[in-house]
């Protein structure tokens, strides 16, 4: 039986001397109706799942009860940079980290491979250079002969490391140049524009590493490995129409990139038989001129036709409040229809606090028949958008920690996705850019979703349904989804048994 009322709430209710039976009946009817509308509420758990449910739900309630009178004790109420270490010490996180999470559907190449691997692996390679300006690394790359730049010094990292008296400290300085994590984020990043500028600097700094063709291959494999280790079995990642380069300066076209991605994924699937795969969404930027976007749309149409098992469709991204709207590019985005082509779209939309102007990207995303909506933070402000999303079952890719770090919401209990989750909207949880803020591929975001976006009385059913949603809302073929779901169910049963056995108390005597 599902337990809904925490210990603190029971104590509070006990102070009520007499509640009429008729009043209680009406009250319970409203509560029951609401509970049955939330994600996962209709799932039936096995006896083993119920045993694990009692463990994780009891721990969740203890954490909530401890924060009733002091929000500073509640991890989702504080900034991720300040609460991450405490989160990782919690029993709820320990269980979620072990959990098979299905798929991650909203990711960006270049920000999903751990900075630790970049520093410990990539920067140890020969011919790897950094451009240092005022003691800050602004650019990186691989060169036989580094560029001449009057504004910064190009230094070979291995040579600088060799000159260092403390290699560990040198590597830590490299790491600190990459990470966005700070002890006082509210001071360092006082506004949304400041934190977005810092994120853009991150991409600018690391792109010279990720575009080097040998690194691209290794980074793809490493990314799949890191996600697999965090319980993710399938990925869909956004990527620009990049041109990887060789050490001698020659470049490859994007066809080479797609073929390399496909080959690395197939290699990984051979090495890890329980991995379901990965696919690409081509992503342009809302800063481009209309002619450039039209060329990207045309190129993506060709790639989808040439690589239907790898390339899924097209998206436009960038800081939503200050860049062009989807409507600005409407002619270019409608171009496939003029060619009687069905180019799938996966639009970022509603990643804003504003109601209209940029918030209206949600309307254009729906009219352009987006397959999914990235972020959708502003959705509850648009009642007709909400109705259409529910009617058409358009999945929403929610990224809790990204929305907090990028200053859309400070206390994740106030995230508008809680409204969508309470009404069983088609929601899946992803992580956006986990590397710059030192998040795990998916575990930290799943924790935030469970502890802040879901209701206090949502339990293992929510976690199970969210994981299954990620496979259901992926763009795998029906056959691939069936296979992936079967693999996930095997992992889920193993997870349930492992957690149950680890928490079974044996009494002797």
Image (cartoon, grey):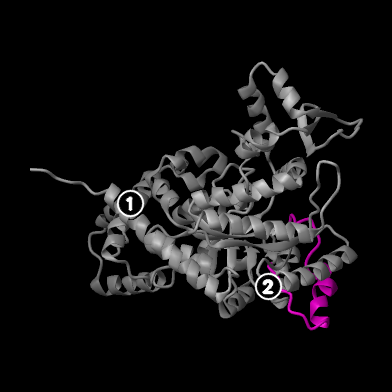
**Residue position for label 2:** 370
Q: Is residue 98 above or below residue 428?
A: above
| Left or right: 103 as drawn, with respect to 500 | right
| Left or right: 403 as drawn, with respect to 340 | left
166 in the magenta segment: no
- Where, by quadrant of the figure, is residue 291 drawn? bottom right
Q: Is residue 113 above or below residue 395?
A: above
- Where, by quadrant of the figure, is residue 23 drawn? bottom left
Image point (56%, 40%), residue name: 81
Residue extending farthest top: 165
What is the C-alpha distance between the residues marked 2 and 1?
A: 39 Å
Q: Is residue 6 at all visible to an observer of this figure? A: no
Residue range (magenta): 318-346
Image point (55%, 58%), residue name: 269
Image point (46%, 42%), residue name: 87
The majority secondary structure of the magenta stretch comes to: loop
Residue 258 coordinates in the image, percent (x, y): 72, 60
Front position in the image: 122 or 359: 122
Q: Is residue 311 at all visible to an observer of this figure? A: yes
342 in the magenta segment: yes
**Residue position for label 1:** 499
- Asked which secondary structure carries label 2, the reply is loop
């Amino acid at each position: 039986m599902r337990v809904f009322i925490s210990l603190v709430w029971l104590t509070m209710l006990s102070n009520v001397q007499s509640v009429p039976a008729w009043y209680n009946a009406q009250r319970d009817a409203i509560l029951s109706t609401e509970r049955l509308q939330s994600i996962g509420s209709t799932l039936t758990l096995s006896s083993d799942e119920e045993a694990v449910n009692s463990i994780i739900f009891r721990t969740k309630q203890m954490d909530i009860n401890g924060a009733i009178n002091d929000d500073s004790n509640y991890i989702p109420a504080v900034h991720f940079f300040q609460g991450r270490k405490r989160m990782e010490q919690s029993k709820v996180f320990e269980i979620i980290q072990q959990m098979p999470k299905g798929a991650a559907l909203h990711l960006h190449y270049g920000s999903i491979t751990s900075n630790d691997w970049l520093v410990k692996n990539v920067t140890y390679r020969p011919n790897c250079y950094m451009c240092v300006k005022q003691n800050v690394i602004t650019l990186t790359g691989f060169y036989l002969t580094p560029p001449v730049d009057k504004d910064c010094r190009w230094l070979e990292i291995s040579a600088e490391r060799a000159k260092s008296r403390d290699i560990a400290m040198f590597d830590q300085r490299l790491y600190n140049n990459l990470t966005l994590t700070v002890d006082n984020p509210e001071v360092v990043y006082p506004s949304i524009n400041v934190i977005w500028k810092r994120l853009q600097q991150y991409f600018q700094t690391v792109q010279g590493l990720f575009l080097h063709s040998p690194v691209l291959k290794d980074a793809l494999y490493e990314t799949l490995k890191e996600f697999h280790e965090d319980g993710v079995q399938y990925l869909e990642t956004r990527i620009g129409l990049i041109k990887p380069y060789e050490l001698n300066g020659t470049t490859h076209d994007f066809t080479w990139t797609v073929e390399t991605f496909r080959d690395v994924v197939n290699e990984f699937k051979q090495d890890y038989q329980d991995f379901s795969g990965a696919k690409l969404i081509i992503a342009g930027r809302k800063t481009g001129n209309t002619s450039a976007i039209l060329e990207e749309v045309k190129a993506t149409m060709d790639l989808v036709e040439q690589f239907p098992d790898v390339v899924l469709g097209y998206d436009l991204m960038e800081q939503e409040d200050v860049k062009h709207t989807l409507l600005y590019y409407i002619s270019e985005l409608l171009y496939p229809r003029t060619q009687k082509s069905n180019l799938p779209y996966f639009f970022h939309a509603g990643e804003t606090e504003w109601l209209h102007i940029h918030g209206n990207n949600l309307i254009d995303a729906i009219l352009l028949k987006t397959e999914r909506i990235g972020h959708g933070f502003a959705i509850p402000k648009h009642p007709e958008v909400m109705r259409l999303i529910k009617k058409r079952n358009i999945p929403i890719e929610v990224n809790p920690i990204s929305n907090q770090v990028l200053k859309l919401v400070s206390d994740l209990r106030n995230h508008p996705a809680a409204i969508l989750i309470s009404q069983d909207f088609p929601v899946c949880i992803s992580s956006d850019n986990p590397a710059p803020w030192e998040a795990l591929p998916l575990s930290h975001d799943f924790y935030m979703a469970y502890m802040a976006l879901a209701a206090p009385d949502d339990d293992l059913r929510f976690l199970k349904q969210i994981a299954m949603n990620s496979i259901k809302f992926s763009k795998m073929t029906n056959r691939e989804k069936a296979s992936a779901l079967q693999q996930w169910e095997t992992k889920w049963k193993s997870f349930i048994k492992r957690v149950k056995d680890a928490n079974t108390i044996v009494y002797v005597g």
